[in-house]
Every structure is written in structure tokens, then in C-alpha cells.
Image (cartoon, grey):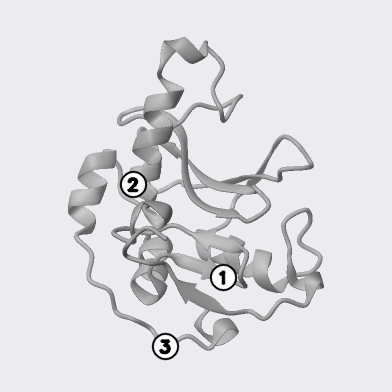
């Protein structure tokens, strides 16, 4: 990813133990490495990579708490926004979003507290319907989205976008 984007690693220091304590599971090691190098922000002006402490727009933990509270609010009925899955709740099994696109594609991990270390990527395209499961790392999935034109329906390389990265704003913009 560093080579692909020409990015200079930031070396961000993160209290992963506190974040993982809140979630009740460890996060994927490659995600933590990606975040320490890039922080939260936008790849190729269209793929949003969520991190921590980047303001609400790029803070995956804040986004997760909001999704969890809405998903568990009975006034919205029994249908989850991520059906047929649920939003991950500590100790359970469900989705935690770590990325999205400007056209409403969603990228999540399927986390099962009983299987820590197993983090398949589930992705849903806004116009194709249904979830697609990928048994690959966060960084491999993100690389394929950005660089593999044949990675359908999520690859964006065929659009000739510059493979760039812009950090998120600390003020939530």
C-alpha cells in the first residue's frame, strides 16, 4: 500500500489495548499496521478508510457505537441494517465497518468473539445487493479494491483514478 500510494509512513501511536478492550476482541494485525502508517482518510478520492481519533467522519469506534445503538433500538423493528447479519456487540458475532466508498459501498469485518483472529471481510456494493465474503486480510482487500481492475464489483482501478491517500481531518470534516 505504501508503494502503491507513494505515502510516507506516519508512525501513529495508538492505544490498541484500550480500543480492543472496548470491542472485547483484538483487531486484525494488518489493519493496525495500515492505520499506524496512514491514519484514517481517503484513498483515490473515493475509498474511505476508518481509523481512530480522526473526528467523527473517520473514527471507526464512534461509527461502530452509533451503528450498534441503532441496530439494537427496537423502534426500528427487528431488521438489522446489515441483515442478514447484525452489528457486532461485545462477546457476540457481527459486523464492524472499517471502510466505505463515496458511492455507498461498505467494507466490514465479520467478528466472532469466540473466534478471535478470524476476520473475513464482508463487503456490500450499493447497486449489486447482498454481502460478498472475502477470506483475505484488510490490506489485501484494500489493495485489490485500489489496484485490481478485475476485482468486481469493488475494484476501482478501471476508472483511472490516481492511487493517492489524503488523511482525515481531526475536526470531523
Q: Residue 121: x and y, percent?
A: 56, 48
Q: Residue 115: x and y, percent?
A: 39, 38
Q: Residue 20: x and y, percent?
A: 26, 47
Q: Residues within 10 Å of mark 3 (few under 14, many from 20)?
A: few
Q: Is residue 88 visible?
A: no
| Residue 61 - label | 2
| Residue corresponding to mark 3 | 8
Q: Nearer the viewer, residue 31 or 83?
A: 83
Q: Residues within 10 Å of mark 1 (few under 14, many from 20)?
A: many
On the rendered structure, is 69 left or right of 86?
A: left
Disc with the residue nearer the chain's start (2 vs 3): 3
| Residue corresponding to mark 1 | 43
Looking at the image, residue 15 lies above or below residue 104:
below
| Residue 27 - label | none
Is label 1 in contact with label 2 (beta carbons under 8 Å)? Answer: no
Q: Is residue 140 visible?
A: yes
Q: Residue 111: x and y, percent?
A: 44, 39
Tell me the SS state at disc 2. Answer: helix
Looking at the image, residue 88 lies above or below residue 14:
above
Identify the residue at horizontal 40%, vertical 43% (top origin). Answer: 63
Amino acid at each position: 500500500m505504501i508503494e502503491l500510494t507513494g505515502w510516507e509512513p506516519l508512525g501513529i501511536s495508538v492505544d490498541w489495548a484500550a480500543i480492543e478492550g472496548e470491542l472485547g476482541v483484538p483487531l486484525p494485525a494488518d489493519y493496525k499496521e495500515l492505520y499506524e502508517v496512514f491514519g484514517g482518510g481517503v484513498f483515490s478520492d473515493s475509498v474511505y478508510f476508518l481509523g481512530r481519533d480522526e473526528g467523527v467522519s473517520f473514527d471507526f469506534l464512534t461509527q461502530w457505537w452509533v451503528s450498534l445503538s441503532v441496530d439494537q433500538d427496537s423502534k426500528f423493528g427487528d431488521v438489522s441494517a446489515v441483515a442478514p447479519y447484525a452489528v457486532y456487540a461485545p462477546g457476540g458475532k457481527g459486523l464492524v465497518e472499517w471502510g466505505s466508498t463515496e458511492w455507498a459501498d461498505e467494507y466490514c469485518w465479520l467478528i466472532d468473539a469466540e473466534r478471535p483472529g478470524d476476520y473475513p471481510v464482508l463487503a456490500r456494493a450499493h447497486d449489486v445487493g447482498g454481502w460478498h465474503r472475502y477470506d483475505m486480510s484488510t490490506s489485501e482487500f484494500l489493495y485489490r479494491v485500489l489496484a485490481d481492475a478485475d476485482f468486481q464489483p469493488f475494484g476501482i482501478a478501471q476508472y483511472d483514478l490516481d492511487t493517492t491517500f489524503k488523511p482525515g481531518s481531526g475536526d470531523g470534516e
